[in-house]
Image (cartoon, rainbow, N blue to C red):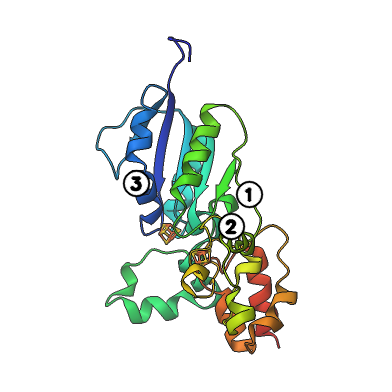
């Protein structure tokens, strides 16, 4: 790097989420220290109260939009960010909180809160891309820290992140795993789920439940008979962390109509 090259400024923002994806960034402590001469962490409230003024070169956004205030704030974040990257299932697909989109949110607030009148919430939880343009989406619940490092490194080097969009199945084959569905009849969403976890669950003889969301061109109709599940359970397996991802949503709604 040239001695006078300015450092890339990074901001991290939280919306409706559990903070797990921000923890993946904190888990990169050693790697980020190694990039200290090229990267300035300018705004990251989970890590530091110090905050530098924007605009920021790259913003990482965790969480979904669930309140009117969120909907205003994400537009401000977009205005002060040259590049905006969404991290995790909440930010890319509405998260587990998007289950409200398939029901009436007042059915939930009325039983969860003693005084539901105080709750200012939207009827839906939606991904960031439903509100502002997004430059890159990183999947997972939580995201994989090595993939996150690749995204940051790609921005430092002005190139597209090399994140493969193939399925968890490919990762299983690379690890030499026996297929849990073929060998044991365990329902598994690996064939339609985006890679990134290293086939974590099948490596422990569990089926994948799709926490990385849909892979590119997932064929859910072809997979479903292999799972051995009936319609109510098929609705349920597609309605978890990525229920609002278009391909999983279409699959669950299709089974709901059966
Ligand atoms: S995607 Fe998962 S780990 Fe990340 S913030 Fe949302 S719920 Fe938490
Ligand atoms: S195998 Fe599936 S459910 Fe398990 S961590 Fe990977 S993507 Fe998530």
Q: Where is residue 226 in the image (x, y as percent from the top left)?
A: 68, 82
Q: Position of residue 60 (x, y in %)?
A: 46, 42
Q: Residue at x 59, y 72 (%)?
A: 178
The residue that mark 3 highlights is 27
Whole-angstrom CA distance, mark 3 to mark 2, is: 20 Å
Among the two numbered marks 2 and 1 on one chain, the one whose residue lies closer to the N terminus: 1
Location of residue 194 in the rendering, given as x and y in whole percent from the top left corner? 60, 59
Query: Dot 1, how many residues are within 10 Å of its Cα: few (below 14), some (14-19), or many (20+)?
Result: few
How far is mark 2 from mark 1, CA to CA?
Answer: 7 Å
Q: Can residue 76 be seen in this view?
A: no
Q: Mark 1 highlights which residue?
A: 164
Query: Residue at point 52% right, 70% down?
Result: 202
Asked whether the residues under the numbered discs 3 and 2 touch, taking CB atoms below 8 Å apart as contact, a structural biologist would say no
Q: Nearer the viewer, residue 180 or 10?
A: 180
The label on residue 195 is: 2
| Mark earlier in primary sequence (1, 3) | 3
The C terminus lies in which quarter of the figure?
A: bottom right
- Tell me: is circle 1 under 8 Å from ligand 2: no
Please determine whether, in this image, residue 165 is positioned above or below residue 5.
below
Q: Is mark 3 on a helix, strand or loop?
A: loop
Q: Is residue 152 above or below residue 246?
A: above
Residue 34 lies left or right of residue 222; in this view the side is left
Q: Quadrant of residue 120?
A: bottom left
Cβ atoms at labels 2 and 1 below 8 Å apart: yes
Q: Which residue lies furthest to the front in this view?
A: 176
Res. 72 mark: none
Badge 2, how many Cα within 10 Å: few under 14, some, many 20+?
A: many
Q: Do the residues labelled 1 and 3 touch (CB within 8 Å)?
A: no
User: In the image, is the residue at mark 2 within 8 Å of ligand 2 by its beta carbon?
Assistant: yes
């Amino acid at each position: 790097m040239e001695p006078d090259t300015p450092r890339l400024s990074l901001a991290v923002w939280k919306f409706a989420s559990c903070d797990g994806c921000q923890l993946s960034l904190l888990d990169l402590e050693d790697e980020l220290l190694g990039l200290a001469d090229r990267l300035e962490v300018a705004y990251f409230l989970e890590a530091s109260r110090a905050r530098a003024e924007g605009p920021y070169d790259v913003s990482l956004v965790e969480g979904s939009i669930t309140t009117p205030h969120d909907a205003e704030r994400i537009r401000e974040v977009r205005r002060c960010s040259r590049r905006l990257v969404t991290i995790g299932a909440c930010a890319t697909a509405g998260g587990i909180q998007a289950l409200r989109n398939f029901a009436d949110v007042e059915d939930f607030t009325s039983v969860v809160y003693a005084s539901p009148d105080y709750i200012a919430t939207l009827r839906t939880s939606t991904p960031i891309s439903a509100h502002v343009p997004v430059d890159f989406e990183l999947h997972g619940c939580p995201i994989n820290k090595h993939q996150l490092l690749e995204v940051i490194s790609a921005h430092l080097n002005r190139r597209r992140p090399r994140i493969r969009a193939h399925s968890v199945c490919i990762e299983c084959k690379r690890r030499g795993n026996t297929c849990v569905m073929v060998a044991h009849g365990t329902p598994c969403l690996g064939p339609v789920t985006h890679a990134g976890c290293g086939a974590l669950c099948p490596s422990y003889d569990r089926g994948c439940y799709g926490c990385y969301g849909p892979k590119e061109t997932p064929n859910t109709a072809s997979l479903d008979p292999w799972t051995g599940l009936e319609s109510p359970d098929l609705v349920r397996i597609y309605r978890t962390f990525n229920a609002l991802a278009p391909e999983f949503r279409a699959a669950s709604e299709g089974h709901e109509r059966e």
